[in-house]
Amino acid sequence: MQRAGYWIVIGLWLAACGKEESAPPPLTAPSTAETEPLFPVENMMRGAQLYQEQCAQCHGPEAQGHPDWENPAIVAAPPLNGTGNAWKKKKSELIAIIRNGASRNGMPVMPAWKGRLTEQDMEDIVIWFQALWPPEVYDDWREANAAPVAPQGLSALAGLAR
């Protein structure tokens, strides 16, 4: 019995030695999309600091919003972390809300930050809370906000009309 086990081990060892290894995949440079961060780190860090100083009191330190934000009977700040409706707005709309404030039924529910924050400050705050969005939410937002591409034939015709 011991001799049979010996021959099985030898047979397995020989089979393993004769097996050809597949060549490793060729090395390629990562694409630009894989190497460039989605959000500039410096802007994101500035945005995080500004958010904590200016926005966290209402929207929460993790941009989680007030628990009753969906209740129309009360004024409560919505989440900005991708779990609310912020991702349904264009970036320009998000910045406009920060700049001009927001109202519901003619009553102000968020102060205007124009004159207190610069345009770059507002942009950095949006960059920070967008970095909190789950990848699938951010991907959906990017897809919805992608610039439409004109059909090739139409762009050629537009040049002729000039």
Image (tube, helix red, strand yellow):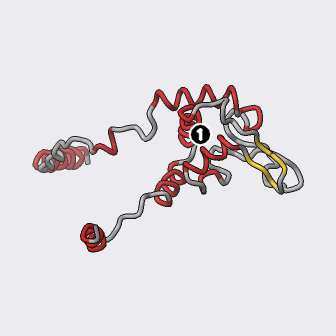
**Left or right of residue 90: residue 8:** left
Residue 42: percent from the left, percent from the top? Answer: 47, 27
Which residue occupies 81% across, 46% down? 108
Looking at the rendered structure, the number of numbered marks drawn on it comes to 1
Of all residues, the one furthest to the right in this rendering is 73
The residue nearer to you, when weighing 32 against 88, is 88
Residue 81: percent from the left, percent from the top? Answer: 63, 44
Which residue occupies 84% across, 55% down? 71
The residue nearer to you, when weighing 101 against 20, is 101
> Where on the picture, by quarter, is residue 113?
top right
Tell me: residue 148, above or below residue 33: below
Type of residue at label 1? Phe
Q: Residues within 10 Å of mark 1 (few under 14, many from 20)?
A: many
Which residue occupies 59% across, 36% down? 122
**Left or right of residue 98: residue 9:** left
Q: Which residue is mark 1?
A: 129
**Left or right of residue 59: residue 142:** left
The residue nearer to you, when weighing 9 against 109, is 109
Residue 55: percent from the left, percent from the top? Answer: 70, 34
Residue 7: percent from the left, percent from the top? Answer: 17, 47
Q: Secondary structure at mark 1?
A: helix
**Left or right of residue 11: residue 113:** right
Which residue occupies 53% across, 27% down? 45
| Image quadrant where one finds the C terminus | bottom left
The residue nearer to you, when weighing 43 against 115, is 115
